[in-house]
Amino acid sequence: MDFNNTQIAFSMKSARDLRNAKFLFSTISSPALVKTFKALTLAALKIRFPVSWIVKPTLYRQFVGGETLEECTKSLKLLSDYNIKSVLDYSAEGGSTREDVLRTYQETIRSIDYARSNPVIAFTVFKPTGMAVGPLDACSAEEMESFRERFFSLCRKAYDNDVRILIDAEHFATQDIIDAITEEAMELFNKKRAIVYQTLQMYRTDRLEYLKRLHSASIARGYIPGIKFVRGAYMEEERMLAKQRGYPDPINPDKITTDRMYDAGLEYVMDNIDSMELFSGTHNYDSNTLLAELIDKKGLKRNDERVWFSQLYGMSDNISFNLAAEGYNVCKYVPYAPVKDVLPYLLRRAEENTAMAGQTGRELQLINAEITRRRRFRS
Ligand SMILES: Cc1cc2nc3c(=O)[nH]c(=O)nc-3n(C[C@H](O)[C@H](O)[C@H](O)COP(=O)(O)OP(=O)(O)OC[C@H]3O[C@@H](n4cnc5c(N)ncnc54)[C@H](O)[C@@H]3O)c2cc1C
């Protein structure tokens, strides 16, 4: 796979979009600037000082589809013109009061309704902790029951509408609870095909073994597990928590081990593709190349419904657009929410891009190459 074809990679972007992206990635490549921006934004929020005017034309424009489902329609349509489907991701992370939870729940229901018979949407998704009032690992039996009800009713809604639903993975401390409920939901709703997808963070030392156990259990119980792989987004926090609370670090000792685990997971599912389905969420060149090769080597159709590639909206378009141009199934996670509610997500993206110096450098290099190519083409 060649991910460096910038004409294909940025075919959706106007000259203004490219200039905005260049400015943004240059800015967030500086950790000091991101740190200052984060501190100022959080302070402004505390005193209810409006931040939309600075966030909306910059970070928000790059990484978010819109404030509402309806506002995302244009971006979704544009992506689908290039053979890229979407995952509608309501990304409000404001708080965990009963009102917040009900609002997130209702909006997720709406996203499932919207996805039904809408061919540009390939999956729906929710963050499990968004369905719980208060911390999941310390909630009352009554609240746990309400959480389960919301969880199952979202999965049932997806099943009734024949829409696939991804369950995002979060912190280690709550993941066992989420895994257990997701397995129950998969057993209920994935009899004929994967509707409910579980997320495995391959930066965890135990996930490959878990994958194999899950697969054996699914065969014994007669269901098809949907497996979403990611490397994992909370590494530093997890290492710190393990130290503070005195349990073994659940994260692999180094990046190479995580990369190996991720790729071994891909190979395992592809070797068992008749009894599992796959969603690979990564911006990593090698893992995306490996999966594309495995699809071809195994003689699957490139658009086999059981195998999907995915990247986040506003990131690694070179991977998404080039894979889609080659006929593979690709979808973008498209976050949407009002500016103030999506700020934690945006700050994570800014920090992630700063932390991944290589990633930011790569984005900038590709954007610059495309700006130069267009200039040359015009002259
Ligand atoms: C479509 C999509 C959906 C996602 N959904 C989720 C989700 O539900 N839950 C979630 O947690 N994250 C999710 N993520 C984020 C994901 O977990 C990664 O943080 C992010 O994608 C970067 O990893 P990568 O594979 O793209 O790239 P890479 O740059 O190749 O990998 C970076 C990742 O490698 C791991 N890593 C880095 N250094 C080390 C080290 N020293 N030791 C061990 N491991 C290391 C970390 O996980 C780090 O994030 C999602 C990402 C995508 C694209």
Image (cartoon, helix red, strand yellow):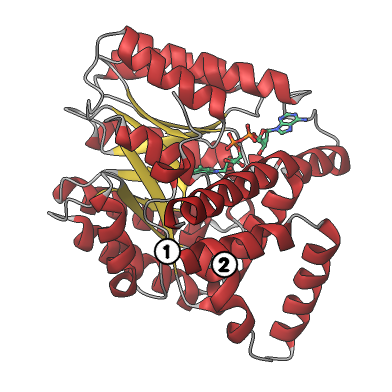
**Residue at 72% across, 77% down:** 41
**Quarter of the image where one finds residue 274:** top left
Q: Is residue 181 visible in the rendered structure shown here?
A: no
308 sits to left or right of 137: left
For the N terminus, the image quarter is top left
**Quarter of the image where one finds residue 357:** top right
Q: Secondary structure at mark 2?
A: helix
Residue 252 image offset from top left, x and y in percent: 73, 24
Q: Is residue 37 visible in the rendered structure shown here?
A: yes
Give the answer, above or below, for where 273 lies relative to 30. above
The residue under label 1 is 14
Residue 247 image offset from top left, x and y in percent: 81, 32
Residue 48 image offset from top left, x and y in percent: 67, 91
**Quarter of the image where one finds residue 28:** bottom right
Q: Is mark 2 within 8 Å of ligand 1?
A: no
171 sits to left or right of 179: right
**Residue at 78% across, 30% down:** 249
- Amino acid at dot 1: Ser
Q: Which mark is residue 20?
A: 2
First of labels 1, 2 by sequence position: 1
89 sits to left or right of 284: left
Q: Are marks 1 and 2 in contact (CB under 8 Å)?
A: no
Question: Callout 2 environment at 10 Å: few (<14), some (14 to 19), or many (20+)?
Answer: some
- Amino acid at dot 2: Asn
Q: Is mark 1 within 8 Å of ligand 1?
A: no
Q: CA distance from mark 1 to mark 2?
A: 10 Å
Question: Callout 1 environment at 10 Å: few (<14), some (14 to 19), or many (20+)?
Answer: few
**Residue at 64% across, 45% down:** 365
